[in-house]
Image (cartoon, rainbow, N blue to C red):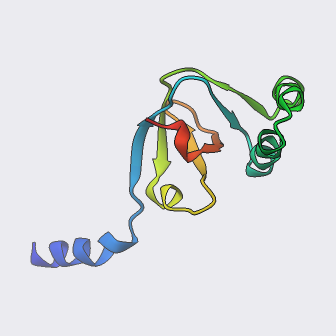
């Protein structure tokens, strides 16, 4: 029993902690980080038409259903660029969005 506890204590720092989160209303996510970064350039350029066109026609980004439950790795939450990898509950593929997209 003590060996098992010692093993758990030794492995604990290497475990990855996941957080359940909920998406806020009116959020967007993309299938890869590069697409999300491109979407952010349209935001920073205040080019609403390009933003909408990219979401509607790229096939790489889409609106997220309000209140969608997702799993986010704790490591991603600490990254400085603010782009977070997530996986929606019940789905196998991951996506990317901004840190502020979550409640």
**x and y percentages locating residue 84 in the rendered image:** 59, 50
Residue 21: image quadrant is top left
**x and y percentages locating residue 78 in the rendered image:** 49, 61
Residue 58: image quadrant is top right
The one of 44 and 29 positioned closer to us in this rendering: 44
Residue at image position (39%, 57%) is 17
**x and y percentages locating residue 91 in the rendered image:** 57, 32
Residue at image position (49%, 55%) is 77
Q: Is residue 36 left or right of residue 89?
A: right
Q: Is residue 68 left or right of residue 58?
A: left
The one of 10 and 86 positioned closer to us in this rendering: 86
Residue at image position (60%, 54%) is 82
Decide: is 38 above or below 70: below
Seen from this angle, which residue lies furthest left? 1
Q: Is residue 22 left or right of residue 26?
A: left
**x and y percentages locating residue 60 in the rendered image:** 80, 35
The mark total stands at 0
Placement of the N terminus among the 4 image quadrants:
bottom left
Placement of the C terminus among the 4 image quadrants:
top left
């Amino acid at each position: 029993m003590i060996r098992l506890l010692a093993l758990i204590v030794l492995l604990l720092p290497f475990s990855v902690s996941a957080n359940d989160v909920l998406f806020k209303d009116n959020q967007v996510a993309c299938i890869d980080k590069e697409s999300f970064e491109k979407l952010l350039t349209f935001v920073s350029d205040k080019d609403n038409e390009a933003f909408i066109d990219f979401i509607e026609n790229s096939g790489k980004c889409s609106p997220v259903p309000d209140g969608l439950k997702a799993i986010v790795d704790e490591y991603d939450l600490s990254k400085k660029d603010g782009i977070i990898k997530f996986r929606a509950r019940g789905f196998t593929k991951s996506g990317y969005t901004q840190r502020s997209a979550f409640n």
